[in-house]
Amino acid sequence: TRQILLASRPEGWPTQENFTLSDATLPELGIDQVLVQNHYMSVDPYMRGRMNDSKSYTAAFQIGEPLEGGAVGVVLASTSHDVPVGATVLHNLGWREHAVVEAANAKLVDPSLAPESAYLGALGMTGLTAYAGLMYAGQFQEGETVFVSGAAGAVGSIVGQIAKLSGASRVIGSAGSPEKVARLMELGFDAAFNYHDGDVSEQLQAAAPDGIDVYFDNVGGDHLEAAITSLKVHGRVAMCGAISQYNATEPTCAPRNLSSAIGKLLTIRGFLVGEFSDKADEFAQKMAGWLSDGSLTFDETFREGLDNAPQAFIDLLKGANTGKMVVRL
Ligand code: NDP
C-alpha cells in the first residue's frame, strides 16, 4: 500500500518537495483493530500548521512519518466486535490508501444516508465547525446580520446557509473569485463580494450598510479589521481560522482598529471544533434534516488519487476549491 510522508517542513507556501509518496507494508492486526481501505481523504487548512515544528493545539507532523487527517473507507478485516468487516468508517489516518486503525477511533457512518465524502465535510468536521461556531461561539440570534469570510469554502458555505435557515435577517459572504460570488448568491446569501475587487472594509460596508451582528472569521487580517469596523454594539466574532496568515513568514499585524472593540462591547471568541463535541448529535440531526428536505446543499471539489493529494492540499490553500476539497483514493 502507499502513503504520503512529510519530507520536509515548508517555509512559507508548501510545495511538492515537502511531501514524499512511499510504499508501506501493513502491520498485522492487533486486538480491537481494523484494516480500512480508504475511499476518500480530507485535506484541510489546519494541516498547514501541523507541518510546522511548533507547539499548537495539535501535534506537529514528524519528518519521515506519514501525514494524518480525516478519511472514510470500508473495513476489510477486523478483530473488533464493534466494527465489522464491510462497515464504512470515519477515522483520522488519511494520506494513505490503507490504514490499520484502533476500532475505538473508527466511527461507523451510514453510506445510505449520504455520500461517503460528506462525512468529511457537511456531515463531518467542517459542518460541525460551521454549526457550533455560528450558534455557540458566535451566539447567533434570529434576526441578526451575519458576515462570513471564506464563504465559498467547506466551513463558510455551510455557515451562511445555516444562518439563513436559522432566521438571519441578512447574510453576507466574501470569497476570492466571481464564480464563487455567483455561487454564494445561488446558495441564498443576501450579498456577496470578491475580496480581490477592492478594499474589504468598503465592500463590507456597502453590503451591510446597517452593520453586522456576527462575524464568522475564516480569514483574519484585513477581513477581521473590516468586520470590527462594521460590527454593531454587542457584536460577536467567532474566530474560526486565519487562512490569510497560515503561510506568512513574518508575524502579521493585528487589526489596527482592535481597540474599538471596547466601546462597542464586542466579544471576540476563538474556538476549536473539538470543544463542541457535545453538540455533535444535535448537529447531525439538524444537518440530516436540512439535507433531506433540500434546504441546505454542499459543494465538493474532488481530486483523484493519492499521488494528487499534496497538490490538492496546496491548491486548497490557494482557493482552487469550491466547498469541501476531498481526495478520492
Ligand atoms: P476552505 O474550504 O474554506 O478552503 C480554504 C479557502 O480559503 C480557499 O478556498 C480560499 O478561498 C480561502 N483563502 C485562501 N487564502 C486566502 C486569503 N489570503 N484571504 C481570503 N481567503 C483565502 O477551508 P475550510 O472550510 O476547511 O476552513 C476554513 C477556515 O476554517 C480555515 O481558516 C480553517 O483553518 C478554519 N477551521 C477551523 C476549525 C476550528 O476548529 N477552529 C475547524 C475547521 C476549519 P478563496 O478563493 O475565497 O480565497
Image (spheres, rainbow, N blue to C red):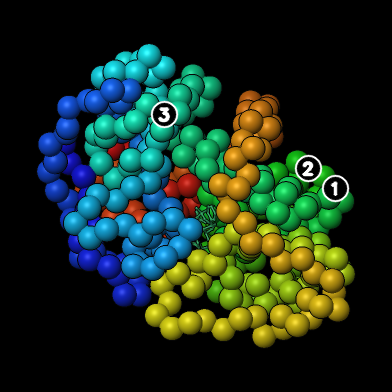
State which mark lies toward you, 1 or 3: 3
Comparing 148 with 208, the one in front is 148
Dot label at residue 142: 1
Residue shown at 78%/76% (left/top)? 261
Q: Is residue 41 above or below residue 84?
A: below
Tell me which label, 1 or 3, sits earlier in the chain: 3
Tell me which label, 2 or 1, sits earlier in the chain: 1
Comparing 73 with 189, the one in front is 73
Q: Are marks 2 and 1 in contact (CB under 8 Å)?
A: yes
Comparing 157 with 101, the one in front is 101
Q: Which residue is mark 2?
A: 166
- Circle 2 — which element? loop
Q: Residues within 10 Å of mark 2 (few under 14, many from 20)?
A: some
Q: Position of residue 30 (x, y in %)?
A: 24, 25
**Residue type marked 3:** Ala
Q: Is residue 166 above or below residue 293?
A: below
**Residue type marked 2:** Ser
Give the residue at the far front of this rendering: 31
Q: Which residue is mark 3?
A: 104
Seen in the image, is 229 located left or right of residue 118?
Answer: right
**Residue type marked 1:** Glu
In the image, the residue with mark 2 has its CB under 8 Å from the nearest atom of ligand 1: no
- Circle 1 — which element? loop
